[in-house]
Image: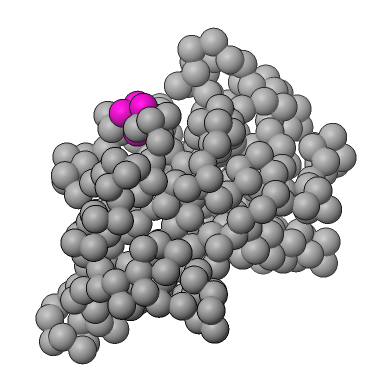
């Protein structure tokens, strides 16, 4: 019950303080709008696991895809694409200086690029200050050419004109340069959750007490990996919880059908690699091992040049 309560707290925090919503372009196709600048990144990452933030964001994308499918049924086309609008109004130095947020947002971008490469027809970044433009230049090397070709970042003074190319102003909220209001409210809260405000400290997780009962403590040195070999029966449930004292760490699970593989590249990836910041809120997860045999759990710090990671973790196996 305690785990379920924590998940509910995380969901409530994300729903209240992550601004986003769905609108339409001139053709009637969906627009997913993210009010990234409104988010209290430091408060958010003291309150929810980075994995929960990423899942929350991917769920919003999945809903956008569902809206695309519904639109395709209306138009009779095989598929429709959506537009993504990032509003960076209120963005602060914390968005750029917070390593946890930078790590989480980069992971989200890479997941999106890998799993949803054909979903977008345009990415519009509005009200972007000079600092945001500099930050964007540092991640372009991670993006494919097909994604970067979709991105448009107008000047801070020209963002309304840029929006007008893609949306009908009479059906667009007044707060973003349109003519639409709901009972005098220019934000149109039935369409957009504004999400502004500091996250109350009642949501904060105390990193010193949140994970008191752990089975293993180890140090994963820079340029190294920590591998755990387990053998399980068919349909066993493998569960994990882990946390570092500083920064992020990579995680993956591999299956060795031969039980004689010499390295991870010869094994079958079962739980795909993901790199998450987990120094404030622990990461939890689990899956069912449908095949019996040998599995390798990987904690990865190979990418780090200098930083060793002190790692606390639990691995549980429930054999059905």
Q: Quadrant of the C terminus?
A: bottom right
Name the quadrant containing residue 65: bottom left
Residue that appears at 29% across and 84% down: 70
Residue that appears at 40% across and 36% down: 129
Q: Residue furthest left?
A: 77
Residue 116 screen position, x and y as percent: 29, 57
Residue 233 shows up from this direction? no
Instruction: Tell which of 19 and 117 is nearer to you.
Output: 19
Q: Residue furthest top?
A: 306
In this view, 320 is above or below 308: below
Instruction: Tell which of 233 and 129 is nearer to you.
Output: 129
Q: Quadrant of the N terminus?
A: bottom right
**Range shown magenta:** 134-139
Residue that appears at 29% across and 41% down: 155
Residue 268 screen position, x and y as percent: 38, 45
Left or right: residue 188 versus residue 70 is right
Left or right: residue 206 versus residue 105 is right
Instruction: Tell which of 314 and 280 is nearer to you.
Output: 280
Residue 73 screen position, x and y as percent: 21, 87
Residue that appears at 14% across and 78% down: 78
Magenta region, mostly helix, strand or loop? helix
Residue 177 shows up from this direction? yes
Instruction: Tell which of 8 and 237 is nearer to you.
Output: 8
Residue 57 screen position, x and y as percent: 48, 57
In this view, 141 is above or below 71: above
Q: Is residue 19 magenta?
A: no
Left or right: residue 137 versus residue 174 is left
Name the quadrant containing residue 222: top right
């Amino acid at each position: 019950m305690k785990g379920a309560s924590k998940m509910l707290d995380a969901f409530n925090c994300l729903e209240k303080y992550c601004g986003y919503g769905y609108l339409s372009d001139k053709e009637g196709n969906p627009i997913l709008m993210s009010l990234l600048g409104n988010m209290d990144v430091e408060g958010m990452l003291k309150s929810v696991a980075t994995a929960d933030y990423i899942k929350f964001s991917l769920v919003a994308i999945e809903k956008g895809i569902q809206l695309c499918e519904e639109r395709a049924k209306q138009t009779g086309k095989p598929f429709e694409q959506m537009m993504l609008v990032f509003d960076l109004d209120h963005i602060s130095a914390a968005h750029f200086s917070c390593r946890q947020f930078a790590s989480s947002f980069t992971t989200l971008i890479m997941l999106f690029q890998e799993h949803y490469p054909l979903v977008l027809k345009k990415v519009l970044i509005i009200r972007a200050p000079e600092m945001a433009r500099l930050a964007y230049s540092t991640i372009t090397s991670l993006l494919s050419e097909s994604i970067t070709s979709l991105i448009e970042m107008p000047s801070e003074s020209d963002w309304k004109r840029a929006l007008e190319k893609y949306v009908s102003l009479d059906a667009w909220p007044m707060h973003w340069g349109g003519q639409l209001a709901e009972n005098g409210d220019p934000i149109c809260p039935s369409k957009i959750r504004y999400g502004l405000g500091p996250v109350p400290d009642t949501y904060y997780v105390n990193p010193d007490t949140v994970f008191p009962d752990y089975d293993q403590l180890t140090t994963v040195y820079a340029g190294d990996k920590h591998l755990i070999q387990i053998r399980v029966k068919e349909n066993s449930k493998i569960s994990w919880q882990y946390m570092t004292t500083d920064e992020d760490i990579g995680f993956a699970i591999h299956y060795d059908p031969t039980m004689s593989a010499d390295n991870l590249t010869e094994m079958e990836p079962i739980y795909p690699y993901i790199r998450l910041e987990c120094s404030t809120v622990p990461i939890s997860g689990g899956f069912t091992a449908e095949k019996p045999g040998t599995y390798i759990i990987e904690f990865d710090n190979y990418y780090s040049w200098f930083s060793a990671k002190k790692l606390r973790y639990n691995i549980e196996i429930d054999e059905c």
